[in-house]
Amino acid sequence: MLSKQMSHLKVDPAARQRSKLIRMNKELPGALVEEIGGTIGVMEEHVDFLKERFSLITMKEFKENKEHLADKIVCIFNWANKPDVNSELLKALPRLKVIASAGAGVDHLDIKMISSYGVKVANTPHAVTNSTADLAMTLLLVAARNFMEAHQIAVSPNTVRFHANWVGGDITGMTLGIVGMGRIGYKIAQRAKAFEMKILYHNRHRRPEEEKSVGASYCERLDDLLQQSDYVMLVVNLSPETEKLMGKHEFQMMKPSAMLINISRGLVVDQEALVEALETGQIKAAALDVTYPEPLPRDHPLLKMSNVVLAPHMGTATRGALRLMMEEMVQKITHF
């Protein structure tokens, strides 16, 4: 009789959720994530691995149960630049020790502000190196060989025969100028060497060992690299010094036959100057994995240009790279 009566009792769903979350967080350290799955959440295929080490708490769960969960959270998984890290969030997490950000760049985080709360920031530069270098070469090859137009010719219902004199650009023996010879820049140089390209690089500091390894030549002045290169590859971190590094003057320094490839950050390029350079023939083409903003407004001129190849910021978008990235994030959090 008692069990029958109890079956009619209504249980508060919010109370049940709070109870579940409290039990879940008793043993493992709490890790805040934006969500699980979806377009910006941690990948579902990573969840089992993560749950062995952390109690995952989504932003929705946290907002609904701040008083119970705030003291449980010791780290944030900043995946796809989410969750947004601001003062309000940091004030609400008294035990937070570290924010692990997926990828090499941390320009989306206010490091100074975060540090003022005694919180560390970790990134994953090693995990992204090879996949980003691979994409850099993909963009170079696609732009050089005019692959987008070639694809349209091949699939068009109006194509009767292929034009014998339709051509793309050469790669072997051409000059690649790499702006930023860090980990990724060096990996790109290794790949370019396999294509028998002449390699120039511009960097804050000369790198003699890497230079010797790939047969690269150092250009202390960016203008010198731009004037000589058939392909200019941007591989720098975004900083006050590199914002709009490529502007009107720099495009004027490039060959009219040259192409720009940007895999760094959209703000490294003055996009208005780039549009003008492409429209007026100052440079031949551009291949961009990054823009500002992302995605571009649907009426932006770059979306309508036949001499522009665009990718959706996919340098790290391989199954292997994302798994390595997640594992490196866990390693960094565990270290702190």
Image: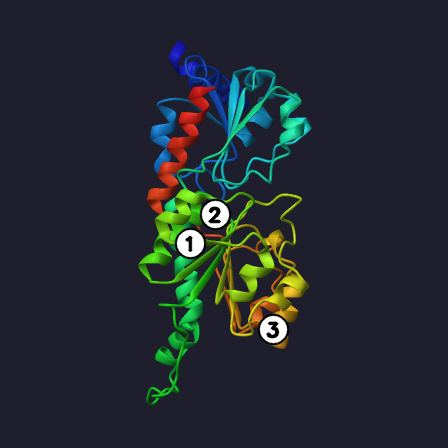
Please give the residue where the numbered disc 3 appears in the rendered image. 282
Q: Is 150 above or below relative to 296?
A: below
Is residue 72 shown left or right of residue 334? right
Please give the residue where the numbered disc 1 appears in the rendered image. 216
Residue that appears at 42% across and 22% down: 54
- Measured in 3D between alpha carbons, the distance from the residue under mark 2 to the one under mark 1, in whole angstroms, is 10 Å
Q: Quadrant of residue 168?
A: bottom left
Q: Quadrant of residue 210?
A: top left
- Measured in 3D between alpha carbons, the distance from the residue under mark 3 to the one under mark 2, in whole angstroms, is 25 Å
Foreground residue, 179 or 5?
179
* Amino acid of disc 1: Ala
Q: How many marks?
A: 3
Residue count near mark 2 (Cα–Cα under 10 Å), binned few <14, some 14–19, many ≥20:
many
Q: Contact, CB < 8 Å: mark 2 with mark 1? A: yes
Colour scheme? rainbow
Q: Is 24 above or below relative to 35?
A: above
Please give the residue where the numbered disc 2 appears in the rendered image. 181
- Measured in 3D between alpha carbons, the distance from the residue under mark 1 to the one under mark 3, in whole angstroms, is 26 Å
Q: Is 79 above or below relative to 255?
A: above
* Amino acid of disc 3: Gln
- Give coordinates of residue 144: x percent, y percent: 43, 70
Q: Is 194 above or below relative to 10?
A: below
Foreground residue, 261 or 209?
209
Q: From the image, which quarter does the N terminus lie in?
A: top left
- Give coordinates of residue 308: x percent, y percent: 52, 68
- Give coordinates of residue 299: x percent, y percent: 63, 67
Mark earlier in primary sequence (3, 2): 2
Mark earlier in primary sequence (1, 3): 1
Query: In this view of the protein, can residue 157 be seen by the observer?
Result: yes
Closer to us: mark 1 or mark 3? Answer: 1
Residue that appears at 48% across and 47% down: 181
